[in-house]
Image (cartoon, rainbow, N blue to C red):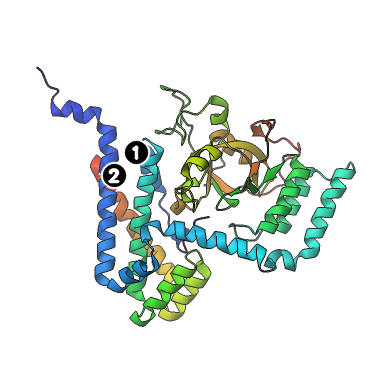
Amino acid sequence: MAHDPPNTNYKINREKVDTEFVRNKLKLKSLEAKRSLFEKYPHVKKFLSEKGLDLGKIREHSARVITAGALAGTLLFAPPILAKNAPTVTNIVKNLADLGETNSDVPKQQTLLSSLQQILPQKVGPLERTQEKTLEQVFSQTTGVDAKATLEGEHLNTTYGYIGAEQHLARYPGDKVPDMAPGLGAWGYVPADEEKWYVVVQTLYLPDWEKRLPYLVNWYKYRKVLVVNTLNGNAVVGDIADSGPAAWTGKQFGGSPEVMDTLGGPRYKKGPVIIFFVDDPENKVPLGPVDYNKVEALGVKMIQA
Amino acid sequence: MSKLFFDHLIVFDEVEIIIKKTASSKEEKEELWSLVDEYVNHKVIEKILDRLPKENHEEFLELFHKCPHDEIVIFGYLNEKTGKNIEEELKNELEIISKDLLKEIKSFNN
């Protein structure tokens, strides 16, 4: 019986070998780094062990600390930003009520942007629950989309973060379009409509992801989200189809080419956004751009990667 | 949000591209991300302890445990205890770490 020469197998499995090569290299580097740290500083190993910490999983601990801090800020103390700016919040809500009652000449996108400027902290990062509650009202009144930071008890690690450009995901076996990711989405092949408007969130870093895996996997599958560019007010309803990006990229979300184009144009690669879950029990909110105002972005500068 | 106090210093765009091109499934991608994370976290702690007086190690580790995401608190502490701009030094170290990592994972193609 004839056998393939080893060289042929090597070529056929080149892609797989690449993965294994990279994985082995990274494993080796990681082990070396661990060994070097603990040999040089054995008290670090002792400290981590006493605290039940693993530097390889320190991000889960960080997510728990941040979540606990956000909840404590809401439940126990006056949220610093909102307490300081309480009249501002009242004004925002009043302006929104006026917007609903009258045929205001002020474009909704402008109302949205000025509200964002008053609500959001200077640095992109997790928001207080009270800030998120105010934003829910702002989004509902301006874009008409009923979106929630916490839906059915689920909340992302952050709702205010940076989104980065992702590649297309395969819709069926053999699917081939330019700029396509080599792997599948988190739930395999993505139906065409969902693929076009897909969004990526860091489910992998949710503190309870592994504990509640079966429930959360289903809950997040193609879950609709409202994505709002906080610099120009452009908004899109997308659906969650993949997990990522890696925390060390400095980004918290990803968007399909169409999502990114809607948010900031064809050259838009990275920028700050808010992502809330769309409260849509009857599945009536369509995926795609939220064309709530045909006014051009107000001369704000996009972030280009 | 899952954030560590030195995340803003990490520029691993090329590593990210290689992983995206290499991994053929979500699980593979997440595994490779996690290995990079593990490697970088150990290196960063080592580089910090190299610069920090031994008597402050325990205090730093407690701080890291309490607020691993807070760059203002942690870099403030490190700069005070070392009298150096640790943020800047760590940035340079991370550039070296990134180049080293890239060299390793790209060596297959050479």
Front-most of residues B91 and B36 = B36
Residue A140 found in image quarter:
top right
SS under mark 2: helix
For the point 41% across and 39% down, which residue is it? B26
Question: Which residue has dot 1 on it?
Answer: B22
Residue A58 percent coordinates (x, y)? 42, 60
Q: Amino acid at mark 2?
A: Val
Q: Nearer the viewer, residue A292 or A3?
A: A3
Alpha-carbon span between mark 1 and mark 2: 8 Å
Inspect the image, locate mark 1, and give the three-letter code of the amino acid beneath it.
Thr
Report helix, strand or loop for mark 1: helix
- Give left or right: position of A35 versus A104: left
Tell me if residue B15 can be seen: no
| Chain for disc number 1 | B
Please give the residue where the numbered disc 2 appears in the rendered image: A22
With A253 as the anchor, is A152 left or right in this view? right
Residue contact at pointers 1 and 2, CB within 8 angstroms: yes
Q: Where residue A133 is drawn, which disc sits there? A: none
Q: Residue at x 55, y 53 (%)?
A: A157
Please identify the quadrant where the C terminus of chain B is shown. Answer: top left
Residue A156 visible in the shown view: yes
* Vertical relation: B44 (above or below) A21: below
Q: Residue A78 location in percent, x, y?
A: 70, 68
Q: Chain of mark 2?
A: A
User: Residue placed farthest to the top in the image?
Assistant: A1
Q: Residue at x 53, y 30 (%)?
A: A195
Residue A284: x and y in percent read 69, 30
Pinpoint residue A158: horizontal percent, then vertical percent: 57, 53
What residue sits 71% from the left and 51% below the top?
A135
